[in-house]
Structure formats: structure tokens, C-alpha cells
Amino acid sequence: MPHRSLEAIFANNQRWAEAIKSEQPDFFKTLAEQQSPDFLWIGCADSRVPANEIMGLLPGEVFVHRNVANVVVHTDFNCLSVIQYAVDVLKVRHIIVTGHYGCGGVRAALENRSMGLIDNWLRHIKDVYIHHQRLFDHLDTEEACDLLCELNVCDQVAHVCHTTIVQDAWKRGQHLTVHGLVYSLEDGILHDLAVNVSGMAEISTIYRMYSDQDMLDRLPSHRRRQLRDSPDTLR
Ligand SMILES: [Zn+2]
């Protein structure tokens, strides 16, 4: 691919803005006035994985956080601040953690070479590997890389759910579902990893900030009676 200059970027930008304005004259006026996205996207910083385009959404429709290998770390105030603002202020209804096959960060985590500071970040993905190590028996390198891309998404979905931000939202009855997807660079298709979580009862007890009783007290009385009759519902 030829190198592009910054001048080309400005020229592209002019064309893009004019094309949008000719299709929807009020687009930028509306955009400047407010954003009310339904989605928070947490994805990889990889230049081949642009959130809006993949989902067919326009600016203003998705709030985006990206880092190398779409990792959610409990002490990363950058990511936590994005989640908090998206959930508490923008009131997004879906948080989508999206990985992608062929992720360089995930591949590097499977190897034993040093690339500098980023090695420390990729330790979080090595942790995912260690947690699920037995699943990697008998896989070749490519299969292992694909599986780790998928498992990394599943673990990061759990990390999102374990934050106080998401649990506080569930406690006050806010509708919020956390999803895990993986994107294929080869055909541009998103795959659902079926790790959708939309309530406290779906996460491991050790990570819950509120007891079953706290949650039970919040429910309407008929639901409380129903759950009391089948105590296994709230694990
Ligand atoms: Zn990546």
C-alpha cells in the first residue's frame, strides 16, 4: 500500500464531509447537538477493525474504546472511565467486546519474545491462556491463536460484568447487556460468541458487589415470591 500524506487525509475529509452534507443536510448540526448511542464498543486498536463501519453505524451511534487486543483490566482508569461514562451518562444498552481472528496482540501473547513495554499489557492475555490451558492441548499454532482470540473476548466480557459500574447499573434496574463477538478479517463477518450477560445472577458469586438478598429486595413482589419458590434461580 502506498504511503499517504497528511494533505491526502485533509482532502479525504473534505470529500467525506461534503458527501454526508449533500445526503443529509442536518447531519452535522444534529451530531454537534447531542450523542445518544445505544452501544459501547470495546475493540482492538488494530487498524483493520473499525467499529462504525463493521456495524454499519454512523458517527453518534456507537461509543468506542479501543486498545491492543481489546483487554478490560480492573485498574485501567482509561477503560473504566469510558465504561462509566457510557453506562451512567450516555445510558448505553449494550456493551460489545469484540475481538478479531489474526489479532497480533493475541498471537504475540502465545509467543516467547519481547517487544518492549507492551509485553506487560499482553501478560493479561497470557493469563487467559493459563486459565484455560487444557483446552489448548493438541491444537496447532493457528487453531490455538483463534481459540485464544475467542477466549480472550469471553474473559473480557466477564471483566466488564465484574466492574462496580455495570453491577451498580443492574442494581438500579438499568437495562444493560454485555456481549462478546469476534470479527473475521478474511470475510468481514462478526460472530456472536454467545456470552451475553444481562444481570447479576449470571456472574460468579465471588465477583458480585451485592448479595442475592439485595437483588431480591429490588424485584417486584410477585417475582420475589416466584424466586423464593425456586431458590436455585438466583445462584
Ligand atoms: Zn488485534
Image: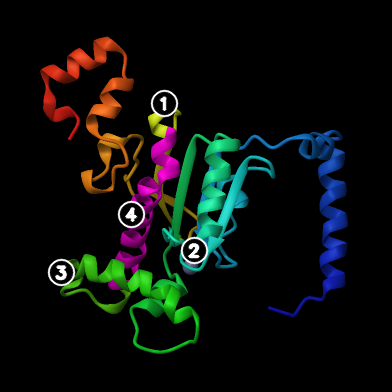
> Which of 102 and 173 lies nearest the eye of the viewer?
173
| Residue extent of the magenta highlight | 144-169
Q: Residues within 10 Å of mark 1 (few under 14, many from 20)?
A: few
Q: Identify the element where label 3 is drawn.
A: helix
- Which residue sits at x=68%, y=41%? 60
Residue on which disc 3 sits: 134
Mark 1 and mark 4: Cα distance apart in space: 24 Å
Residue 23 vs residue 185: left or right?
right
Mark 2 and mark 3: Cα distance apart in space: 27 Å
Specify whether tag 1 is near ligand 1 (CB below 8 Å): no
Q: In this picture, is 232 found above or below 85?
A: above
Mark 4 and mark 2: Cα distance apart in space: 19 Å
Q: What amino acid type should be assigned to the residue bearing mark 1?
A: Gly
Question: Is residue 167 one of those drawn in magenta?
Answer: yes
Q: Which label sits in the foreground, 2 or 3?
A: 3
Residue 140 screen position, x and y as percent: 25, 77
Considering the whole magenta stretch, tell me its main secondary structure: helix
Residue lying farthest top? Answer: 222
Labelled disc at residue 185 = 2
Q: In this picture, is 12 found above or below 170?
A: below
Q: Identify the element where label 1 is drawn.
A: loop
